[in-house]
Image: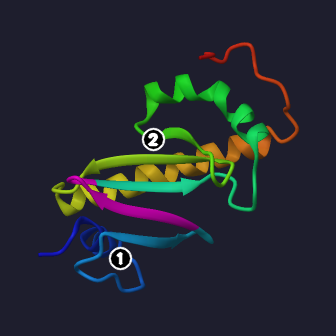
Amino acid sequence: MATSIARLARAIAYPDGVGDAAVSHVFRVDGAEMVAEEREGRLILRRNLAPDGGGPADLVALAGYAAGRLLKEEAVLAWDPEAEMPFLWQEISADAPDDRLCRFFEVFATSVDWWAARLNDAVGISQIPEMMIRP
């Protein structure tokens, strides 16, 4: 039986082969890497929002949008402390039917595009916006 990653690759007609036993795979989408992992019954997609390098200022630039976006989408903004850059992730049940996996991928890719556009718009912001929810 194929893993959710292999089924996702077939559902989106991904041109490169993905083995039926794959539990992780790096998809090349729009010239950037999107990581897929299957673990604990979940399929998780992840994409760095600043693949050419980033930093805390990128997270600051995006943080003001995070609370509002949680109401509109299931993708979650997070911070990778090792790479020092913001990333977006989203998950779905690994047992989801192929048509739901395809839709999941499309919606996630749209979210990535939206967040990447906000990052491009916000270049140069260096202080925490007042509307940000602070820990």
Instruction: Work out whether 69 lies above or below 79.
Output: above
Of pointers 2 and 1, the one earlier in the residue sequence: 1
Disc 1 target residue: 13
* Residue situated furthest front in the rendering: 82
Q: Is residue 39 magenta?
A: yes
Label 2 and label 1: CA atoms lie apart by 22 Å
Residue for point 55% across, 50% down: 112
Instruction: Work out whether 14 lies above or below 62.
Output: below
Disc 2 target residue: 75
Asked where in the image residue 8 lies, by quadrant, the reply is: bottom left
Q: Is residue 124 magenta?
A: no
Asked where in the image residue 126 lies, by quadrant, the reply is: top right
Identify the magenta region.
Answer: 33-42
Tell whether 32 sits left or right of 4.
right
Image coordinates for residue 69, horizontal then vertical, percent? 52, 30
Image coordinates for residue 5, horizontal then vertical, percent? 30, 68
Q: Quadrant of the C terminus?
A: top right
Mark 1: which amino acid? Answer: Ala
Mark sitting on residue 82? none
Mark 1 surroundings within 10 Å by alpha-carbon count, few (fewer than 14), some (14 through 19), many (20 or more): few
Instruction: Work out whether 17 lies above or below 78.
Output: below
* Residue situated furthest left in the rendering: 1
Q: Could you say whether the residue bearing mark 2 is in a helix, strand or loop?
A: loop
Mark 2: which amino acid? Answer: Ala
Residue for point 17% across, 75% down: 2
Is 63 or 65 nearer to us in this picture?
63
